[in-house]
């Protein structure tokens, strides 16, 4: 599956981001794709997930599944 052009999408920054430019992510979506990128590098790489996979990732983060 190829990633659609996301350059003109409205990216939303994480609500946990601050104005200091720390570790921040932005999320943007197209149809069945949820894309994630580093807000400090908008021209850098983008991770693309199907909506169900992204929902599973968020649930895993919230429940501590990926904590060490």
Image (cartoon, rainbow, N blue to C red):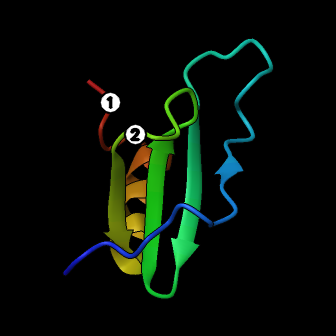
Number of numbered discs overlaid on the protein picture? 2
49 horizontally vs 35: left or right: left
Q: Secondary structure at mark 1?
A: loop
Residue 23 locus on image (x, y percent):
55, 21
Report if the CB atoms under discs 2 and 1 are less than 8 Å apart: yes
| Residue sitting nearer the eye, 62 or 29 | 29
Q: Secondary structure at mark 2?
A: loop
Q: Quadrant of residue 17?
A: top right
68 horizontally vs 26: left or right: left
Report the residue marked by disc 2: 64
Report the residue marked by disc 1: 67
Residue name at image x 52 percent, y 39 percent: 42
Residue 66 locus on image (x, y percent):
29, 38
Residue 54 locus on image (x, y percent):
40, 66
* On screen, residue 59 above or below 52: above
Residue name at image x 66 percent, y 56 percent: 11
Give the residue at the far left of this rendering: 1
* On screen, residue 3 above or below 58: below
Residue name at image x 50 percent, y 66 percent: 6
Give the quarter of the figure containing the C terminus: top left
Residue 8 locus on image (x, y percent):
62, 66
Q: Residues within 10 Å of mark 1 (few under 14, many from 20)?
A: few
Residue name at image x 34 percent, y 63 percent: 48
Give the quarter of the figure containing the N terminus: bottom left
C-alpha separation, residue under disc 2 versus residue under disc 1: 5 Å
* On screen, residue 18 above or below 39: above
47 horizontally vs 15: left or right: left
Give the residue at the far right of this rendering: 19
| Residue sitting nearer the eye, 3 or 63 | 3
Q: Residues within 10 Å of mark 2 (few under 14, many from 20)?
A: few
């Amino acid at each position: 599956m190829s990633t659609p052009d996301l350059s003109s999408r409205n990216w939303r920054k994480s609500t946990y981001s601050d104005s200091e430019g720390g570790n921040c992510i932005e999320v943007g979506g197209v149809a069945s794709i949820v894309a994630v990128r580093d807000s400090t590098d908008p021209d850098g790489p983008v991770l693309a997930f199907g909506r169900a996979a992204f929902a599973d990732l968020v649930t895993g983060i919230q429940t501590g599944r990926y904590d060490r």
